[in-house]
Amino acid sequence: MRDASRAGRRLAAACALILAAAAPLRAQQVPEPIALPADSTDVVPGPSPAGAFVRSLLVPGWGQASHGAYVRGGVFFALQAGSWFMLIKTMAKLAEARSIETRRVGAVRDSLLALAADSAELAERYQDPRNLELDLQRAAEQDEGVVDIRGLVHAREEQREDWIAMTIFMTLMSGVDALVNAHLADFPARVSVDPALGGRLTVGVTVPAGRAP
């Protein structure tokens, strides 16, 4: 019995020593890292392709710049700003030409009224405003000053139509380019769509170094 009691005490002492040795090891264990939610330093994605298209319609180059294509955005901004400038300038010149036309036609009208003041027959004829307008139209068609300014007005009108078409084309082109750029934002190669002469489009693909086959 004494041997069994002695063996039990030895076993208890051995277990105590093992537990005492394991306690410091537990204290030295490194706690597992705690997962934290992503902070505000994450990269914010650009707008959707439709959003980029609308942005470029509202502000030239905005859709391209929202995806980091600042150079392309600047190019389209310059092109659209130039087309708008020329359109406004042409419209101002057209308004000036029409004003000159109005003054010259008014001078022809005054000359007809001056003739009617010395002619009872013309005075009686011009009592009907329609007769005055008919004679004024005929006289204006024969007046060199009126003919010249009307030719200039016609030329300005054609220029205005051309610049309206160009401005609309560049606006839509900027939107389409922003749309394509947004679709290919994660594509490894760079795809470019640029306007060319004659209303055509040129498409180019540039593969970064190291990814070419």
Image: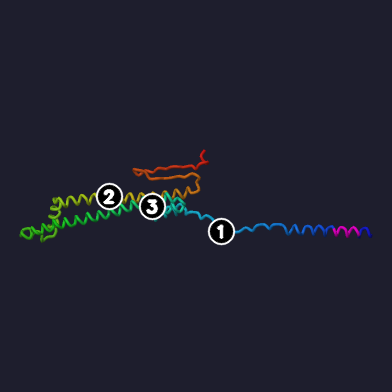
The answer for how far apart the CA atoms under marks 3 and 1 are is 34 Å
Q: Position of residue 180 (x, y in %)?
A: 44, 48
Q: Residue sitting at 12 percent across and 60 percent down?
A: 128
**Residue 39, label in figure:** 1
Q: Amino acid at mark 2?
A: Gln
**In the rendered structure, which amino acid carries the disc numbered 3?**
Phe
Q: Position of residue 84 (x, y in %)?
A: 33, 53
Determine the residue positioned at 65% across, 57% down: 33
* Residue 128 vs residue 199, the one in the foreground: 199
Horizontal and vertical percent position of residue 168 = 35, 51
Please give the label number shown on residue 159.
2
**Front-most of 56 and 19?**
19
| Secondary structure state at the residue bearing disc 1 | loop
SS under mark 2: helix
Q: Quadrant of residue 37?
A: bottom right
* Residue 209 vertical placement versus 107 (above, below): above
Q: Position of residue 112 (x, y in %)?
A: 10, 57
Q: Which residue is mark 3?
A: 77
Q: Farthest residue in the right direction?
A: 1
Q: Nearer the viewer, mark 3 or mark 2?
A: 3
Look at the image and give the residue range highlighted in magenta: 6-13
> What is the distance, in whole Å, between disc 3 and disc 2 at their CAs?
22 Å
Q: Earlier in the sequence, mark 3 or mark 1?
A: 1
Mark 1 surroundings: few (<14), some (14-19) or many (≥20) residues within 10 A: few
Say whether residue 149 is magenta: no
Mark 3 nearby-residue class (10 Å; few <14, some 14–19, many ≥20): many
Along the line of sight, the residue nearer the viewer: 188 or 164: 188
Q: Is residue 19 left or right of residue 69?
A: right
> What kind of element bears circle 3?
helix
Q: Nearer the viewer, mark 2 or mark 1?
A: 1
Q: On screen, 213 above or below 20?
A: above
